[in-house]
Amino acid sequence: MKKNYLLIFSVFLLITCSKNGVEENTPLPEDAVLEACFEMSQETILIGETLQITSCSKGASKFLYDFGNGDASTKENPVITYQEAGTYAISLTVSNESGKSSSFEEEVRVVSNDGFYFYPDIAEGFSSTPLELSINPISGKPYYIELLQDEVGSEGSKFYYRELSEDLSSERQYLADKPYNSNSAFVNFFPSGKQNFVFSRTLNSLYGTQEVSYDMNWAFLNGIQSAKKHSYGVLEAEGNYLYYGTEKPGDFHQAAIEIRNSNGDAFQVISLPVPGYDNATIGDMIAIEGGYVAFGGVFKTNMAPPYIADYYPVLLFLDASFILTHHVVFDETALTGVVDASDDLNGSFHIAQLSNGNLAMYAMGELWLTDANGTTLFSQHFEGTPNNQALVGLGDSFVISARDYLKKYNAAGSLLTELKYGGQYLPEIIRYGDSLFFVAGYEDNARIKTFYGSTDTDLNLISLQN
């Protein structure tokens, strides 16, 4: 716990110089051993990486650490993270009951994480925002969907597909122009080689979906514009494909699943009205034993600002026939009043089931952890976090992204470790081999630039530099 150094030091001196007025302590021998000593988990760490300090002092009853950056601690075995590169002198002063003191000092080197990342070329004056990341099932290579925006010229905003080679090089494949607001995208690879790219659209309302399809050689097949259907993702199920999101058959948006066959032809739409709520959407959906579970939100719409009101996250349980059997509305959300525009809903939603059955959900900077029935175990809102963030399940743990940080939790919701990785826009983290891989956007002089990064499952960075 970080504290003001001067205040802690003053309290420290006051305590060590005071006497117990109730019971007099037995004086320590004059030759009692007192020696300050500590060990560090590493001598060189990254910005934002946790440094564990373990005392090996002898005869000490009180501890005072100065971390060399203005922070201090009176814990015996503290942890510290540094936010700037440099060499810091960490000093420990210990004392015993006789008021004697001893000091010890070590240095730690803090280095930037930039040397671990790969930075693709982005032309001057352009912003590049990653919207989706996954593995191409045909080539086995990672790919991402990029929104490239000309911030100073007349080239506008366009969507591109980028598939990464072993050396992380790639070429942009043009997909479509961006005519409306869009902050999420996905692609479905059909067995025939057809590639179906889907982009959600928002203005003052949820303004449907834009789709473009190409064959495996990038010949354009068709494009579809829908003002009533808003798709967030796709899930394969028994040879068909479940496109989930929301549709507006009348005055209200209903959570919906559109079922398409292996050729991409839609043959059924299942509407899932949530009892007691006019509008609902599904942002992510997974298969579980006996059916499916979907994560999204319920809300009200208005003709004038705020266009979205009374937003609450929702968890929908479906049987194998897509019948709604149970739902949970998270009334204790911090997002009600924060989500007030359709663009807020145009981002990334995630749900993952952990090995103990618990469900981890994340959208718009708010994390929820429930048991298998949807009973809340833990929640946290990361204020100021953009709405396209990642969650990846690791069996008995999971990792999320927030502004500037990656955070790892166990299945009970306890924070295990975190890394200040430096990105602000991170829609997906994928498991690639034995590692985690991500494509992140970072803010750079009013632009958004992109970098690639990799860590092990404990969030230790792995260098991508050749």
Image (cartoon, rainbow, N blue to C red):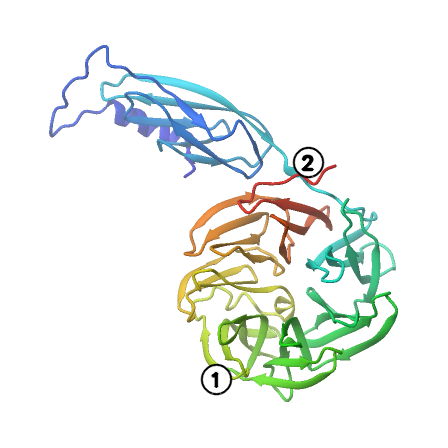
Q: Nearer the viewer, residue 75 or 9?
A: 75
User: What numbered label is drawn on residue 275?
Assistant: 1
**What residue is at 43 percent from the left and 61 percent from the top?**
356
Q: Secondary structure at mark 2?
A: helix
Which of the two labelled residues, at mark 1 and mark 2, occupies the earlier sequence position?
Answer: 2
Question: At 14% from the left edge and 23% from the top edge, which residue is drawn?
Answer: 25
Three-letter residue code for mark 2: Gly
Residue, disc 2: 115
Residue 392 placement: quadrant = bottom right
Does residue 62 appear left or right of residue 291 in this picture? left
Q: Position of residue 84 (x, y in %)?
A: 59, 34
Q: Nearer the viewer, mark 1 or mark 2?
A: 2
Q: Quadrant of residue 172?
A: bottom right
Q: Nearer the viewer, residue 43 or 30?
A: 43
- What is the residue that sits farthest to the bottom in this orientation? 250
Which mark, by number, is residue 101? none
Q: Residues within 10 Å of mark 2 (few under 14, many from 20)?
A: few
Q: Is residue 394 visible?
A: yes
Q: Residue furthest left?
A: 23
Quick one: label 1, few (<14), some, or many (20+) residues within 10 Å?
A: few
Q: At numbered mark 1, what does the secondary structure look like: helix, strand or loop?
A: loop
The spot of residue 19 in percent (x, y) is: 18, 24
Q: Quadrant of the C terminus?
A: top right
